[in-house]
């Protein structure tokens, strides 16, 4: 792309922030950028289940003497 075309396209791209390339801790994302899902209830259920499993494993190992 020539320099004139790049300069001519700048106002159009600058006016639409969703078309910008965004960098961050999750890498590089370009337009269209997806929305993050809010699954905090599912996360709490998984955490509780994992904690219960860990407690039961510890108790079983303590009883068996492993």
Image (cartoon, helix red, strand yellow):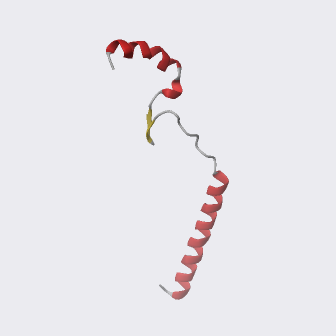
Which residue appears at 49% of the width and 27% of the height?
19
Q: Residue at x 61, y 46 (%)?
A: 37
At which x and y percent is residue 24? 44, 37
Q: Residue 63 occupies which quadrant of the picture?
A: bottom right
**The quarter of the displayed image where residue 51 is located:** bottom right
Q: Which residue is more in the foreground, 22 or 46?
A: 22
* Residue situated in front as seen by the camera: 22 or 16: 16
Vertical side of 10 occupied by 40: above or below: below
Locate residue 56, reporting x and y percent.
59, 76
Q: Position of residue 32 (x, y in %)?
A: 53, 34
At x 32%, y 16%, the residue is 2
Tell me what residue is drawn at x 33 percent, y 20 percent: 1
| 32 relative position to 25: left or right | right
Viewer-closest of 16 and 64: 16
The image position of residue 59, as x and y in percent, is 57, 79
Would you identify the image quadrant in which residue 34 lies?
top right
Relative height, residue 15 to residue 39 (above, below): above
Residue occupying the far right of the picture: 41
Pick whichever, 32 or 27, lies toward us.
32
Q: Residue furthest left?
A: 2
Residue 61, placed above or below residue 7: below
């Amino acid at each position: 792309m020539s320099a004139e075309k790049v300069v001519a396209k700048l106002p159009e791209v600058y006016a639409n922030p969703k078309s910008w390339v965004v960098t961050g801790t999750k890498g590089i994302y370009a337009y269209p950028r997806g929305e993050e899902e809010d699954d905090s209830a599912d996360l709490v259920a998984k955490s509780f289940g994992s904690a219960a499993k860990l407690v039961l494993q510890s108790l079983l190992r303590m009883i068996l003497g492993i």
